[in-house]
Amino acid sequence: MTIGADTQITDLTVNDHACLTFGEPEDLFDLTAAFVRDGLDGGLKVMWLSAATPDRATAELARRGIAVEPALASGQLAAVGFEGRLLAGQVFSAGQALAWLTREMEASGDRGLRLAVDMSWALGPVTGVEQLPEFEEKVAAAVAGTTVSVLCQYDRERFDPVTLASVAGFHTRSVAAATYHADVMLRICRQYAPPGIRLAGELDYQATESLALALTEAIRLAGDVTVNMAPLAFIDVPCARMILDAARGLNPGTPPRRMILRCRPALAARFILLGALDIPAVSLVSADDH
Amino acid sequence: MTTDGDTRPAPGNPGDQGHQILDQAFDAGSLYALRAAVAAHASDAGLPPGRADDLVIAVHELAANAVRHGAGHGRLRIRRSDQALLCEISDDGAPPPASAPEETQPETTTDTPDAAQWRTEPGHGLALVRQVADQTSLRSGPSGTLATISFGLAPSGPPFRLDHRDLDHCTVLAITGPLDLATASQLTQAIDRLLSETPALKLVLELDGLAGWDSAGLAALITVQQRVSASPPARMVLAGLPDHLEKHLRQARLADRFTLADSSAAAAGELSSSEP
């Protein structure tokens, strides 16, 4: 059982220059959505530079509960590509990239800026990519003492350890999804947007300890808890019952807390046969619905 | 100790034990491989996807019981006849402890989100096995436990269809064909539409044309009953249940959730006579 990060994405504050490492696209979108959500909630200008098209990027954010449309319309949120910002064609220059960042920082004024940067551009055939550590060092200096925070996003499966080590020291924090169980059969990790946990693979009684820890930590947070089982192919009765018992134990409070079970229809039927519909806090959502 | 249940028509002729298609040992480390093997054989035998999922969970729960409460290992044998898949899960070691797995524990409620209080009693696994399997048999003795479950290989019946008609100021919704993973959502959506159109719905759900079900079908019946119950004064009566389905609901302890009637006419009478 591992908790794989120094800092949770939700703990980031102004003038952080954080290094996010992720292992799969779902993690990237989830953690980015939380970073964007907290920035919008704080009234900051939020920008996400990624390899995804703007439509795809904003759709992924919307799917995770971010009110994308009004934020885009007001200019508070922007989802953009690398060209003309970090890259000019296939050429990278640390100095020009920093000049672009400086202009964005000035444009955001006192409002503050949250910038998420998918670093996958550095995996391509880009001239000047050797300036990446220099760029990271300059970003660290630029955001220190400001109302700007930058989240650099590195795919740990695709970036080599030497590159990751060369840039790690220039970041103020290291961020990754809290992972409670990860092996070839099963992954249990925290989900940040919407808050809860995500289960992928096949889950049986042998992982109840990890599941209990994940549920306990998710429930300690306020608000509704989402148990995202969309990528889960199998769940046995002890684990399903543990999830339902956790829902039963949610503090009713005001407003009442809900546990949203998102799963494919075959698993939803299992939860229903185990009594899910008799628990007021449970809301079953088909993983076919987005 | 022996418990038996038999709820689906002729899933296996006792004289036709079929031929063995799988003989696989298992322990805690190989339950995934066991599930994969069962899923492959279920699909090969022609079980629809929902029924195949049901077979996998049933075998898993019984095998997990053998691992956790028996010798720590066991053996699965599957025989296939024309009518059924017959699965034997044997724990050939120590017998189960005094708290036998088939004993369902009383309900308790947790007030705090403390994982230590969350239940993981194995008895609930066996309850689910009884809900999804056509036949369940459990025999425990000094030499271990033998669990046997059967899943019928029914020939495909008529395709799924929903038909509406009015009867004595009631709405009759007649189901023809299989109520399963592929069709269950059509039933819930139809009931949602009826409830939105007629808040004081008096619904007869006519089931004598039902030609098979799986756990998604049973879950759909529970779901629509819950939605009707949550929308008073709407009411629903299940009419014309095939005998094997009624017996199955009773053995699976699901029958108490529903009002049952022998026929649609009797159901309409029940709904009319008990009007507020």
Image (spheres, coloured by chain):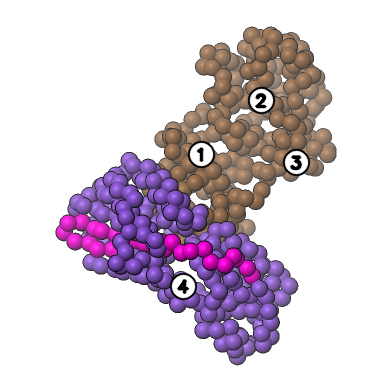
According to the image, label 2 marks what residue? Answer: A118
Mark 2 is surrounded, within 10 Å at the Cα level, by few (under 14), some (14 to 19) or many (20 or more) other residues, namely many
Mainly helix, strand or loop, the magenta region? strand
Residue B245 image label: 4
Residue drawn at point x = 63 percent, y = 75 percent: B173
Residue receiving disc 1: A189
Distance from disc 1 to disc 2, alpha carbons, whole Å, reads 21 Å
Element carrying mark 2 = strand
Farthest-out residue, left: B142
Q: Colour of chain B?
A: purple
What residue sits 64% from the left and 79% below the top? B172
**Do the residues at pointers 4 and 3 share their chain?**
no
- Work out how far the residue at label 2 is from the one at label 3, CA to CA, in angstroms: 19 Å
**Residues in magenta?**
B137-162
| Percent position of residue A44, x then y | 74, 33
Q: Is residue A102 visible?
A: no
- Residue denoted by label 3: A68
